[in-house]
Image (cartoon, rainbow, N blue to C red):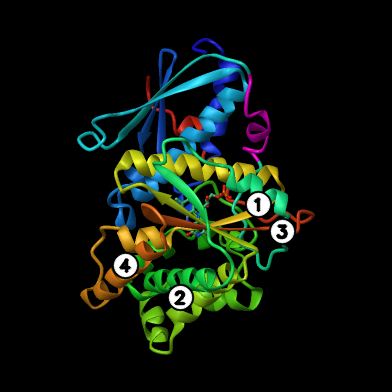
Amino acid sequence: MGSLTPTREKILAAAVAAPSADNSQPWQLRWRGGALELWIDEERSGHDSDSSYLLSDLALGACIENICIQASALGYVSHVALMPELDHEPRKVAIITWSAAPKLDVDLAAVIPCRHTDRRFPWGPVAESSVVRLQSVGIDDGTARIQLIPAGEARARASRILMRAEGLRFSSRTLHAELFRAIRFDVGWHQTCAEGLAPGTLFIERLLRLPFTALQYWPIMRSLNVLGAASMLAWRGAYLPVSKSPLLFLLTAESLQRSHVLASGRLLERFWLRATALGLAVQPFAALGAAAYGTVPIESRLERRRQSLKASVESISKSGVGLVFLRVGQADASRPPMRNARREVVDLLMEA
Ligand SMILES: Cc1cc2nc3c(=O)[nH]c(=O)nc-3n(C[C@H](O)[C@H](O)[C@H](O)COP(=O)(O)O)c2cc1C
């Protein structure tokens, strides 16, 4: 594949279309002969909730999966070598090489440019045949799994746990700062942006936009928290959409070992593309993993809440570590939501 420039362009376009927490796009890419190296972008990774690269590795896993799926559709099988020294040289994540093979995954590659996060609510039900297709998405070695959380008591419990995780983000000054730093209030409510979260993609009701904008200032957030603002935001932003979601899944990793988190990111993306191909909408919620397993120091008064959250997350994860909830449903396809854009591919390429 070394000399095929149009092929390389398609591979890179697929890579950058991958999802990432807060649209941080924490990756860098470098061609070395016929191989593509994938690096963590130090500027965009390793901060706050991402201090152990949990969120970045999920995104890089998704990026790897997009590369493999696109290559597969073009007639190449990908050989992904995760760097064994991941813990000593945390930035260099993988080297990907290719060999010719029959074309596969053409349907998934076709929806890579269409996959997006949909934060609208509520959604319609999902056909049973689609549920079966979604449940068949998996990887062989079991280092990452996606489990369906059935409606009823299990769903109610999961929704309450997520609400606690989201509530923590508005209660802790550190986590609050991280959350609001990613929102690009400077672009207004009607435009998208190439990095970070465009406010219009958050689907905040028109009347609530001004108060929501004010919450970026910690003294205001802290004062309103006395009246229960953190719980109200977590209820509206997470509990309600998740408890009423037609389907809810939980992405787990066998452990927090980085190769397992990368595998989870790959599975997340394959699942999301399958849902997109089935015409379904998806919203991930990563507060769970980030709040429970993030290593960022938070206020000591909240540390007990975090520990109890961690125990709750463990209790609902059938196997391994629960990282991300995914709500899935049938959204209004005639009016697609506003989407976050991406940086230019040239900005992500490192010098060869
Ligand atoms: C690891 C990870 C965590 C995410 N966490 C959340 C989340 O907690 N809430 C949310 O609404 N979206 C979440 N997202 C979606 C991203 O915000 C989204 O992928 C990014 O803004 C790019 O937009 P797109 O998915 O529409 O391409 C997450 C995505 C990833 C990969």
- Residue 215: image tag: 2
Place of residue 176 in the rendered image (x, y in percent of width and height, measured from the top left) = 38, 69
| In-image side of 205 versus 33 (left or right) | right
Residue assigned mark 1: 131
- Residue 331: image tag: 3
Mark 4 vs ligand 1: CB below 8 Å: no
Mark 1 belongs to which amino acid? Val
Residue assigned mark 4: 311
Exactly how many numbered labels are in the figure? Answer: 4
**Any part of residue 24 in sight:** yes
Closer to the camera in the image, 57 or 170: 57
Task: Say whether residue 281 is magenta.
Answer: no
For discs 2 and 1, the disc positioned in front in the rendered view: 1
**Numbered range of the magenta stretch:** 103-113
For discs 3 and 4, the disc positioned in front in the rendered view: 4
Residue drawn at the location 39% of the way across and 53% of the way down: 319
- Tell me, yes or no, whether the two marked residues, 2 and 4, touch with CB atoms within 8 Å: no
The alpha-carbon separation of the residues under discs 1 and 3 comes to 15 Å
Place of residue 91 in the rendered image (x, y in percent of width and height, measured from the top left) = 29, 36
Above-or-below relation of 212 to 342: below
For discs 3 and 2, the disc positioned in front in the rendered view: 3
Q: Residues within 10 Å of mark 3 (few under 14, many from 20)?
A: many
Which badge, 2 or 4, comes first in the chain's sequence? Answer: 2
Above-or-below relation of 231 to 184: below
Mark 4 belongs to which amino acid? Ala
Which badge, 3 or 4, comes first in the chain's sequence? Answer: 4
